[in-house]
Image (tube, helix red, strand yellow):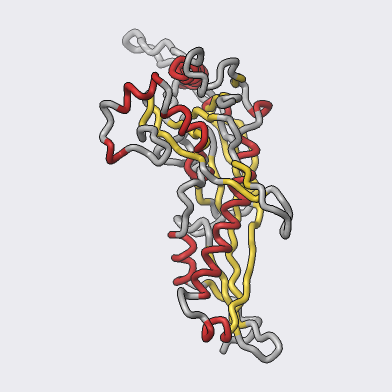
Amino acid sequence: MRTPQERHIDAALSEVSIKYANSGFAAMQILPPVYVSKQSNKYYEFGKENLHRSMARRQNGTPSNRVSYTLSDSSYFCNEYALHDVVTDLDRNESDFGDPDVDSVEVLTEKLMLEYEYEVASMLTTSGNYTNSVSLTHEWDDYTNSTPQSDVSTAKTTIYSATLKEANTMVIPYATAQALALHPHVKDILKYTDPNTILRSGLPPVLWGLRVIEAGAGYASTKYGQTETLTALWGESVVIAHVAENPGPKTLSFGYSFANMPKGKPWQVASWAYPDGGEGGMKHEVFSRLDPVMTCETAGYLIENTQS
């Protein structure tokens, strides 16, 4: 048995942690991970000189016009997220089903993902973080007066005017998605949608040119021991955004999750021996280092009050 000091990265359980994902989590879909080698550093933003016309035609024998570009910088800091559990030898011996080590890692991973989701949802559903947002007068479950297609079209036009990038993603709370699926503007679209591709809410996977991400994650907003009240993390706000298909340092995107972790492994598991009262066991810790950043908030648009 390892001594308590011999902490190591458990490759097998880390794989469990990577694969375990609740389909209701949207944070790392709207803010895709960019893996960085340092916990804190600067990232650079190019100016818009490339969008300005320049006199490029010249006469024979004359020098070309000189053009250049500007850079501005911002900073990120990847905060540490970590939780642990202990699985004793007795837990394993007495278990009649499942694998206590795997079960422990899955619970820890979901709790960490929930914390990160909460942080991202709080940031992205705050209108003060946007240049462009709207609070609807007619909610999307008002099937007589609401105009969801027009609302989304306004968001897409606004994003394109500010960035010359097309909006390609919609994050929509699950309850709002269910209500929108029953809207006359959408029901006609569903007639021509492959039923095998329809999402859980009833929406098509692509709506009005946007990839639909159902944000279904929620949390118990009451304390332990009290009657549980479950609350949806994303409330009644819809986020429209341009999300880079290939995240990178020179690629414009609404935002990124800076991850000071091995590439492709936003969550890892560390394990070490944990003797307790003479009963042997293993301590499993799931951890990550992340920073959610709206790197280009004008590539996003917030629609509030979408459901009554």
Can residue 51 be seen at all in this image of the molecule?
A: no
Q: Residue furthest top?
A: 59
Q: Position of residue 154 (x, y in %)?
A: 49, 15
> Relative to the observer, which residue lies in front, 110 or 305?
305
Residue 292, relative to residue 263: is it above or below?
above
Residue 27, relative to residue 193: is it above or below?
below
Residue 99 vs residue 57: left or right? right
Residue 119, relative to residue 110: is it above or below?
above
Quadrant location, the N terminus:
bottom right
> Relative to the observer, which residue lies in front, 114 or 81?
114
Instruction: Determine which quarter of the picture holds residue 39.
Output: bottom right
Q: Position of residue 64 (x, y in %)?
A: 41, 16
Q: Residue at x 44, y 13 (%)?
A: 54
Q: Position of residue 112 (x, y in %)?
A: 60, 56
Q: Residue at x 49, y 46 (%)?
A: 24
Q: Residue at x 43, y 23 (%)?
A: 183
Q: Position of residue 91 (x, y in %)?
A: 57, 81
> Relative to the observer, which residue lies in front, 84 or 75?
84
Quadrant location, the C terminus:
top right
Residue 160, relative to residue 213: is it above or below?
above
Can residue 113 be seen at all in this image of the molecule?
A: yes
- Count the marks: how many? 0
Q: Residue furthest front?
A: 227
Q: Residue at x 49, y 63 (%)?
A: 17
